[in-house]
Amino acid sequence: MVVLAASIVSKNGKVRRFGLCVALLDIFWVGSLAVLVSRQFVDMSRIRIEGLLAAFPKLIGSGKQHTYVETENVRYVYQPIEAMYLLLVTNKQSNILEDLDTLRLLSKLVPEYTMSLDEEGICQTAFELIFAFDEVISLGHKENITVAQVKQYCEMESHEEKLHKLVLQNKIDETKRRMKEEASKIDQMKIEKNRGNKGGFMSSMGSGRIESSFSDMSISSGGGGGFGSGSGFGLTSDVDSFSSKPKGRQPSSATAPPKGLGMKLGKSQRTNQFLESLKAEGEMIVEDVQPSKSTLYTSAAQKLTDPVTLTADEKLNVTLKRDGGMSNFDVQGQLSLQILNQEDGLIQVQIETGGNPSVIFKTHPNMNKELFANENILGLRDPSRPFPACGLTGDAGVGLLKWRMQSVDESMVPLTINCWPSESGNETYVSIEYEASSMFDLQNVVIAVPLPALREAPNVRQIDGEWKYDARNSILEWSILLIDNSNRSGSMEFVVPPGDSSAFFPISVQFSATSTYSELKAVNILPLKGGAPPKFSQRTQLITDNYQVV
């Protein structure tokens, strides 16, 4: 069998000229036929393929139920799709049954890649359809392939690519963190310089007023007055940035100076050296530095870019037993809403859930419970009341929905850890392995193993990933940047001096994922005042709150 071409053509020949197709694919008309997509699998000129397609509408006629027509040289195998035809042009020596099987497979692929079966939907996904056709037909011959395999091949997922992107993103985040620290140091130096120039007490009180203003602002944005902001679940910022030019409106008033900040002095060089030594030993040091105006406003502006932002967060609490089994599995989640401008507050949110019966949802008291139960729409009891806008203040937003999931099924655990310490002579050999389920792709995985007191770092003989030894806390940290289908299992082996096997427990685990157990997602924003719905974005994250092997 040799397939000469696969095409999608319009029945009536009337089609609007969509920008994508005109610029890149160039919709062309042959007679009364509008060719939307055409892929040739053998060498032929454009004049010939246009001639073959121009002859097709004259051959099919009207009122006929045949699925193919023949000429002296070629055979047309076709299938109607709404107001279009899916058409195969083959030679007459090809097997008609194989042609029909190829046509049937292509007809299943078209709805998979197009949002709507009309001319606009075909044109917008023209390149995706061409790539899918190429996976089915190679040099005119059909490949032994299924729809699922075609989708998998076209996605072209690469573990190396995802790993490279994660490494690059971590470098960007680290650079921005350092920029933020440098900005804080510069602001601190400016404050010290002003104290020296203006002399003593008045300058100190002035800087104290500014610091107090931003401290109060941070407290009010974190604790949150207003509807739904008192929840313990907050929005985590995706990116932190620093800019020398602050955005947004500057505060016009300042609060009264706090007590005890009048004669505050900077840290001495000896204190800084001591803190640096503690950092080198693995101790977390948090410096009390007030954020600058530019950092505060620019960071908030980076958080909210769309008029409406929905954030679905889940926190995972799991306790596994060292000998196997599970003693605790608890997932708590929340859906939060952030609105940039107050005029977009009169809305309702339509959501979809994964249909997991173990997930129990609970709406906010101010939400319309019947509307959610019947139509999966989140809206206020009073439709005339808008949702509050958070603006650029970094407010955690409005809590719309909470859910909880508890289970005793061990298959729901995303990551299991097995630790096997065995003493031999004057050494203890420890083998640790992880096994990850296929439910999630885990990112930034850190497995922290406590060790007995050691004089030097343990001897790591084999590891899938990277390791770091925290000498101050005597903890060995095993890091895996990404766990996906290419590395669902891994192991680490190390040797330490002899000790009790219970010294290697409890093992703490940290990771994150971009999908959740509830599989909750927002599908639409419904404006109550009419007009077009505002643009919205959605953020989904699963993180570990307390994940241990005891």
Image (cartoon, helix red, strand yellow):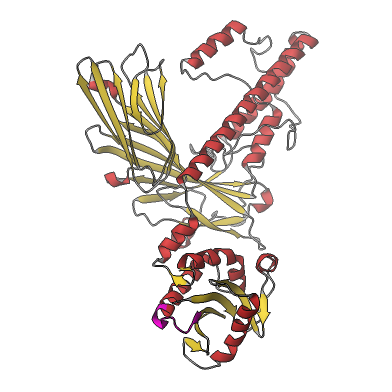
32 versus 249 height, above or below? below
Q: Is residue 458 visible?
A: yes
| The N terminus: image quadrant | bottom left
Residue 74 spot, x, y in % from top left = 52, 84
Tell me which corner region of the image, top left, top right, bottom left or bottom right, holds residue 486: top left
Relative to 83, 415 lies left or right:
left
Q: Image height check: is 261 above or below 549?
A: above
Residue 412 drawn in magenta = no
Tell which of 277 and 519 is nearer to you: 277
Tell me which residue sits at (37%, 17%) in the image. 457
Identify the residue at horizontal 49%, vertical 81% (top origin). 91
- Find the magenta span and give its range: 90-98
Q: Is residue 439 left or right of residue 125?
A: left
Q: Is residue 95 magenta?
A: yes
Residue shown at the point (67%, 63%) measured from the top left: 531
**Of the pair 348 and 545, the residue shown nearer to us:** 545
In the orientation shown, which residue stands out farthest toward the right? 198
Quadrant of res 298: top right
**Which quadrant of the view contains residue 159?**
top left
429 is higher (above) or lower (below) than 281: below
